[in-house]
Image (cartoon, coloured by chain):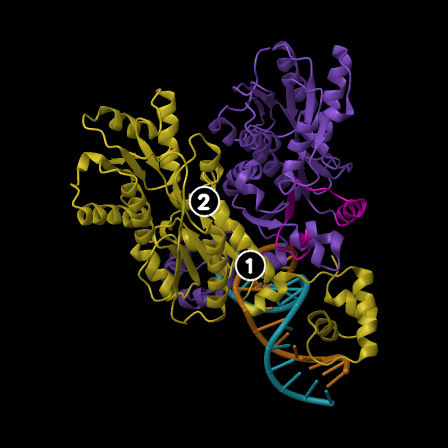
Chain colours: A yellow, B purple, C orange, D cyan
DNA sequence: CTGAAAGCGCTAACAG
DNA sequence: CTGTTAGCGCTTTCAG
């Protein structure tokens, strides 16, 4: 592997001159530059990032943390975000270190895991997808001024940039559409306690019921303790009901589609027996029969925004934070019936 | 950010002693060790990989190259591989640098792009998914002994480890099933010239026809110049046929599903009008109606194997290469009809 | 316009 | 058992 020294020797100059040519800064005589360029080419020189990074304290790598990679498979939520992130980072010559929070359980310093790539200087900043930050995480992040951007949660910290969806507004939109179609017995599916997005959607649901003068019924709120392992529990709870809702408004497409598959297996017709709506805009929703009525999140744009924010924050770790909230479009499918 | 020096000062020892404690090698008196550990904790020390890497020439990062990230979305082929890769790399404390070959077009040193992360010392080795290596790439890789593992292609080099599917055997299996169902007019869909896997499947198709004494018909081989943009061309070519096949055996699920969507839009019933089979085992194939008959690739295991191979090769860049070929299972759906 | 010196954080090799 | 020295490849700073 050739380095500055080799090139410098071959060109008969000092390593500083070569460095200047490589980075195209400082003054170098044209003649010298040509000599150096020739040597660079001949030795097929590639700058070694390690040396550079060590004294610039910048590695040009951004860590992207996903809960685990498995869900990428059935639910491309993270993948689509990643695609947006990648577009922008590539443009600015940064690479992606894709990581999961899996080690958390096995390491002694449990809480630090979100930031491990940064702390080890493998990354200049962190984009967190689907993370739940503990107070301890927040403290660490603020103390060390770790450049952080969170997608899909709203941590309370003046140093964290946030990219998220206008959950409340969007969920009201789809509920309004459901109402418009004549539905009055509206259930909520896919409740989760610790997921900020789902909580917001759930609040919108309750708000909507109140606004329309519809009763809130606790047994019309369906959760599954752990997706996808216990998915069937949700369906079973639904089947046990005596007074059935006419529509299930799910918190995410993943829940909606899971329910539809269970229903199909059980011989329950959708939307004839019960209508269904989702939230996310996963492509698979348009493949299935009936196609899913859902809210389409602009995940690519959201990923792009996150990448831009993290790069800005790395430039200036103390600038005040930005909270970028995105609009969501209604995507009509056949899973929602006129009553 | 604390470093060895800080810790050493606080503990009243030399940085070497601290280094020994951190890496748990060499002899350190218990008493001293305790002192150091206390200081480490108090300063919340994290080893800086840059310093370490610079003199060990090892960064504990593996680059994973995908063609682009976009296809991850509709076709989780790469995502599932990635999941397998991640499992193993995490186990061995390596991180993933996820990259695309996109820069290739925009850089002057076009051919080097697969290896850029390695050449810049951002990674210790490279796993290539969906890559097509030019002779120039091969030369570079051999000269520089770049640890490389290729998934889904069979480059001719004694230094490259390969993970792939037994395409021929697998495609014969699905063709045999098609034959068993009574089909004799069998077409091949989703032909691509430069894709090794598809070529192998296509060869198996021709071999099968010959073996069964069925005629090969060039207009029963359908390709689409560029997926997904020109997907419709494939469907249109099919519609224009006078003598229709009874079944389309597609080279990949992506092609099969694309065709099925076009068919649905055009009001063509599947499998009534024509049966369809795929290859890959994409989850979405089981969501759609009719569900897709296909071959299930063990992508997770393949990813795991690739990760193990690359780690081994980094240990010993000159060891002879391994070609790991995986079996594929038949997955019966409703897209294939009895005749 | 070019070069010499120092140092980023760490570890290998050697000395005590 | 512990410390000193040198150096990984690069850039920043300062001197010429």
**Badges 2 and 1, same chain:** yes
Q: Quadrant of residue A175?
A: top left
Q: Chain of mark 1?
A: A
Can you give x and y, in whole percent of width and height, for residue A163 in the image? 41, 57
Q: From this viewpoint, is residue A39 visible?
A: yes
Nearest the eye: B273 or A267: B273
Mark 2, residue position = A77
Can you give x and y, in whole percent of width and height, for residue B17 in the image? 49, 59
**Residue placed at 56% from the left, 34% from the top?**
B304
Locate residue B296 relative to residue B242 in the image: left or right: left
Q: Which residues are magenta?
A: B115-144
Locate residue A73 relative to residue B67 in the image: left or right: left
Q: From this viewpoint, is residue B28 visible?
A: no
Q: Is residue A314 above or below residue B61?
A: below
Give how far apart the Cα atoms at labels 2 and 1 are: 18 Å
Locate residue A42 relative to residue B242 in the image: left or right: right
Can you give x and y, in whole percent of width and height, for residue B79 in the image? 54, 39
Disc 1 residue crowd, few under 14, some 14–19, many 20+, Cα 10 Å: some
Residue B222 magenta-highlighted: no
Can you give x and y, in whole percent of width and height, for residue A187 in the image? 25, 37
Tag 2 secondary structure? helix
Residue B129 magenta-highlighted: yes
Tag 1 secondary structure? helix
Nearest the eye: A149 or A7: A149
Q: Chain of mark 2?
A: A
Disc 2 residue crowd, few under 14, some 14–19, many 20+, Cα 10 Å: many
Mark 1, residue position = A88
Q: Is residue B279 above or below residue A14?
A: above
**Residue placed at 70% from the left, 73% from the top?**
A24
Quadrant of the image for the N terminus of chain A?
A: bottom right
Q: Is residue B332 above or below residue B313?
A: above
């Amino acid at each position: 592997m050739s380095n500055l020294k080799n090139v410098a020797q071959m060109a008969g100059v000092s390593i500083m001159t070569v460095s200047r040519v490589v980075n195209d800064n400082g003054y170098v005589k044209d003649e010298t530059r040509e000599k150096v360029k020739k040597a660079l080419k001949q030795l097929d020189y590639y700058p070694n990032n390690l040396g550079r990074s060590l004294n610039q304290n910048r590695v040009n790598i951004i860590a992207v943390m996903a809960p685990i990679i498995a869900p990428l498979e059935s639910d491309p939520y993270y993948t689509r975000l990643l695609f947006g992130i990648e577009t922008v980072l590539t443009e600015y010559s940064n690479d992606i270190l894709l990581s999961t929070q899996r080690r958390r359980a096995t390491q002694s310093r449990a809480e630090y895991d979100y930031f491990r790539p940064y702390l080890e200087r493998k990354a200049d900043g962190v984009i967190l997808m689907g993370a739940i930050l503990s107070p301890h995480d927040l403290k660490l992040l603020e103390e060390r001024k770790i450049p952080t951007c969170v997608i899909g949660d709203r941590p309370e910290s003046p140093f964290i940039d946030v990219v998220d969806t206008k959950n409340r507004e969007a969920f009201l939109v789809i509920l309004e559409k459901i109402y418009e179609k004549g539905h009055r017995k509206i259930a909520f599916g896919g409740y989760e306690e610790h997921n900020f997005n789902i909580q917001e959607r759930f609040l919108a649901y309750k708000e909507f019921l109140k606004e329309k003068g519809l009763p809130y019924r606790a047994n019309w709120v369906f959760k599954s303790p752990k997706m996808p392992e216990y998915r069937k529990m949700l369906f079973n709870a639904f089947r046990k009901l005596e007074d059935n809702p006419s529509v299930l408004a799910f918190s995410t497409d993943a829940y909606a589609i899971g329910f539809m598959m269970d229903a199909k297996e059980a011989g329950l017709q959708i939307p004839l027996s019960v209508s269904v709506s989702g939230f996310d805009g996963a492509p698979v929703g348009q493949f299935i029969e009936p196609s899913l009525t859902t809210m389409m999140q602009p995940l690519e744009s959201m990923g792009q925004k996150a990448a831009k924010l993290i790069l800005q924050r790395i430039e200036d770790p103390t600038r005040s934070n930005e909270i970028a909230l995105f609009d969501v479009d209604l995507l009509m499918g056949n899973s929602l019936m006129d009553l």
